[in-house]
């Protein structure tokens, strides 16, 4: 038999099903758009609306300190003087009586997703703000910098951090057409690249790119440069 919370029946009758977010500001609210961008697909949602949402996530969900924040679930991810990106907030009211589970938590996997998406949409500094808050928690003094635990140790969601490379550089490789795409948000750069057949780095300077292969092979027949 499920647990009964005081007042939960009357709340759900008024608000609808429990464990939703209603009018909340959801940090991964445009996750599908982020995934499409990272896979080299065209956005199907108005870019201005996506950017507006991401700016709201940065404005309302990123906290410099969590001293006054109550998290009854797994507070060890971020608490006290830690900063972090909350999964959801209700800045304009309307918080539900039983919002979705973990809504009060901070997950690095969502932080990197939101940060890299902000970068890709041109909001580089806002993305960096989120990354700084995240990495400050995992600086080695309290938490292991190589183990961003969530549901368990070395949890896979933190691998969304790889998206930061694409967020900043726009580097993507099409193995079918052997095309390297670059759409930099930071001007010149040197960035890691990995494909199914090899890895190395991309050196981008003055809108010219060179691929240096450290292991294996990466065949590039065409380089397409956009933006910076």
Image (cartoon, rainbow, N blue to C red):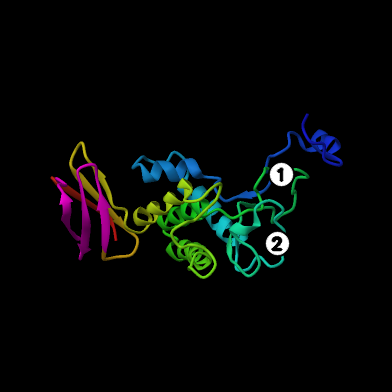
In reply to whether residue 215 is colored magenta, the answer given is: yes
**Residue 225 percent across, percent down from the top left:** 23, 53
| Highlighted magenta segment, given as a residue range | 190-219
Magenta-colored segment: predominant secondary structure: strand
Element on which disc 2 rests: loop
The residue sitting at 33% across, 42% down in the picture is 40
Residue designated by label 1: 99
In the image shown, does 221 or 83 lie closer to the viewer? 83
> In this view of the protein, which residue sits in the foreground, 79 or 95?
79
Q: CA distance from mark 1 to mark 2?
A: 16 Å
Percent coordinates x, y for residue 8 in the rendering: 82, 38
Q: Residue 69, which numbered label?
A: 2
Q: Secondary structure at mark 1?
A: loop
**Relative vertical location of residue 147 with respect to residue 34 in this rendering, above or below:** below
The residue drawn where x is 19% and y is 38% is 177
Q: Dot 1: within a 10 Å radius of its alpha carbon, few (fewer than 14), some, or many (20 or more) residues?
A: some
- Callout 2: few (<14), some (14-19), or many (20+) C-alpha neighbours within 10 Å? some
Q: Is residue 140 left or right of residue 104?
A: left
Q: Residue shown at 29%/65% (left/top)?
A: 187
Quarter of the image for residue 64 reads bottom right
Say if 40 sits above or below 53 in the image.
Answer: above
Q: Is residue 62 left or right of residue 45?
A: right
Image side of residue 97 versus residue 7, left or right: left
């Amino acid at each position: 038999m499920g647990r009964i919370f005081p007042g939960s029946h009357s709340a759900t009758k008024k608000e609808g099903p429990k464990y939703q977010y209603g009018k909340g500001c959801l940090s991964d609210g445009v996750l599908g758009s982020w995934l499409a961008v990272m896979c080299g697909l065209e956005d199907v949602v108005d870019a201005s609306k996506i950017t507006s949402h991401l700016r709201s996530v940065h404005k309302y969900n990123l906290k410099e300190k969590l001293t006054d924040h109550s998290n009854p679930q797994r507070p060890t991810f971020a608490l006290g003087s830690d900063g972090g990106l909350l999964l959801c907030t209700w800045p304009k009211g309307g918080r539900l009586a039983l919002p979705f589970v973990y809504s009060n938590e901070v997950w690095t996997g969502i932080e990197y997703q939101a940060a890299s998406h902000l970068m890709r949409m041109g909001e580089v500094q806002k993305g960096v703000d989120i990354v700084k808050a995240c990495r400050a928690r995992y600086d080695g003094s309290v938490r292991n910098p190589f183990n961003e635990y969530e549901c368990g140790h070395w949890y896979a969601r933190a691998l969304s951090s790889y998206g930061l490379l694409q967020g900043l550089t726009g580097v993507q490789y099409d193995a079918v057409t052997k095309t390297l795409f670059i759409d930099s948000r930071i001007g010149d750069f040197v960035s890691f690249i990995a494909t199914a057949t090899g890895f190395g780095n991309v050196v981008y300077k003055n809108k010219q790119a060179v691929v240096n292969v450290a292991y294996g092979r990466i065949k590039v027949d065409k380089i397409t440069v956009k933006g910076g």
